[in-house]
Amino acid sequence: MAKNKKWSARISKAILRLFGWRVEYTLPDSEKFVLLAVPHTSNWDLVVMLLASYVMGIEFKWAAKDSLFKGLFGRYMLWLGGVPVNRRKRTNFVDQIAGQIKKHDRFAFVIAPDGTRSKAPYWKSGFYRIALAAQVPIAMGYEDWENKVAGIGPSFMPSGNIPEDMQRLRDFYAGMKGKIPENQGPVRLKEEMQTPDG
């Protein structure tokens, strides 16, 4: 780890400790993976996630619309790990991110499957489809606000069996609470509710 990264890790760890947080993590075997940010109920989740990322020594990538990546602010967004996504292009979001992952030797793409800080009946399935398309593992990132622990839990390769893979996620995230628990929705995809006949 470079000297400046060591200092970033130490400072971030000290800040988290000051507020009663600790970081626990198991990094995936792969240098490329889709990292879930769960639960996502507040803007403060981003602050904790960034501090935890410095402690873990991981440079996360995240997506935003390409119009934000212009001029000096655009360079700042890239420095922060932003990945520009062209919403006007016919290639969809999943294909664009999967393509970016395939192009790089190291790529930790973080995504909040809740899709919103408000309570939602389903997770968005983009994270799952990206991991399948890029053939990379899904890592269970978390922020447990009740116990003040953040980090990365187990990771697994998506099998294509959505109910089975989602059950792994339900088992892991069971009991974890976000900063605003009432904003948390169930850990499930709409695709799980669909029958084989449609």
Image (cartoon, rainbow, N blue to C red):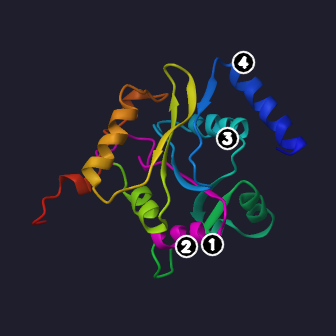
Viewer-side label of 3, 4: 3
Q: What's the amino acid at mark 1?
A: Lys
Which residue type carries mark 2?
Answer: Gly
Q: Which segment is the magenta one?
A: 93-122
Q: Are marks 1 and 2 in contact (CB under 8 Å)?
A: yes
In the image, what residue occupies the spot 37% across and 41% down? 169
Closest to the camera, between mark 1 and mark 4, is 1
Residue type (three-letter) at the residue carrying disc 3: Ser
Q: Position of residue 153 (x, y in %)?
A: 50, 36
Secondary structure of the residue carrying numbered label 2: helix
Q: Which residue is mark 2?
A: 99
What residue did someone put label 4 on?
A: 18
Picture mark count: 4
For the point 51% across and 19% down, the residue is 147
Is any atom of residue 88 visible in this view? yes
Which of the 4 image quarters holds residue 150?
Answer: top right
Q: Quadrant of residue 159 in the image?
A: bottom left
Q: CA distance from mark 3 to mark 2?
A: 23 Å
User: Which residue was labeled with disc 3?
Assistant: 53
Regarding residue 119, the answer to whether it shows in the image is: no
Q: From the viewer's perspective, is the residue at label 1 or at label 3 nearer? A: 1
The extreme bottom residue here reads: 90
Q: Earlier in the sequence, mark 1 or mark 3?
A: 3
- Near-viewer residue (121 or 110): 110
The residue to which callout 1 is attached is: 103
* Among the two numbered marks 4 and 2 on one chain, the one whose residue lies closer to the N terminus: 4
- The alpha-carbon separation of the residues under discs 1 and 2 comes to 6 Å
Task: Characterize the local packing of mark 3: few (<14), some (14-19) or many (20 or more) Cα atoms within 10 angstroms.
Answer: many
Image quadrant assignment for residue 21: top right
